[in-house]
Each structure stands twice: as C-alpha cells, then as structure tokens.
Image: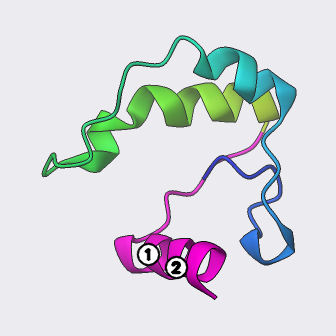
Amino acid sequence: MLNTDGDSSNGIVISDEVRLIAQNWQQVDFTTADLDTELMQIISDVATADSRVPVLPSAQEAKTHYFALFYE
C-alpha cells in the first residue's frame, strides 16, 4: 500500500513525503475486525502525499509478499 508504484514485484519504494508523514502515525491495531477503518488516516495521508489512491492488499497478498521477501 505504501509502495509508490503499487508493484511489489520490482521492489518497494516509499516516497520521502510518506516517510515524513509516517512519523506522526499512531500504531496500527492489526487485530481489529475493521482494518480499513483503522488505516483510514494512513490511506488518506498516502493519497495526499503521493497524489494516488493507495490500495490495501488482501491478507493473502500481504502474506504471500512477506514470505517471498523473507523466506525464498
């Protein structure tokens, strides 16, 4: 979701603008039943900073990417 081009297959790049804004984000509760609401401010901040609509990956997409990065 934070990757500037939305394509994790070519690496993940987070813009300097998002990195700066991220310093003010509250810790995310990933155990919540409503993750979309939990991430609303972050999504809004990324959209403003990068002039794009960030897409929250599904849980399966996130797991697949995580394991590909650290276990392959």
Q: Does residue 64 belong to the magenta stretch? A: yes
* Residue occupying the point 79% across, 34% down: 50
Q: Does residue 19 belong to the magenta stretch? A: no
Q: Start and end of the magenta stretch? A: 52-72
Q: Amino acid at mark 1?
A: Lys
Cβ–Cβ below 8 Å for labels 2 and 1?
yes
Q: Magenta part mainly helix, strand or loop?
A: helix
The residue indicated by pointer 2 is 67
Q: Residue furthest left?
A: 33
* Residue occupying the point 73% across, 52% down: 3
Q: Is 68 positioned to the left or the right of 63 in the image? A: right
- The colour scheme used here is rainbow
Image spot of residue 15 (x, y percent): 83, 35
Asked if residue 26 is positioned above or below residue 10 in the image, the reply reads above
Image spot of residue 60 (x, y percent): 39, 80
Q: Which mark is residue 63?
A: 1
**Label 2 crowding class (10 Å Cα cut-off): few <14, some 14-19, many 20+?**
few
**65 and 58: which is toward the camera:** 65
Q: Amino acid at mark 2?
A: Phe
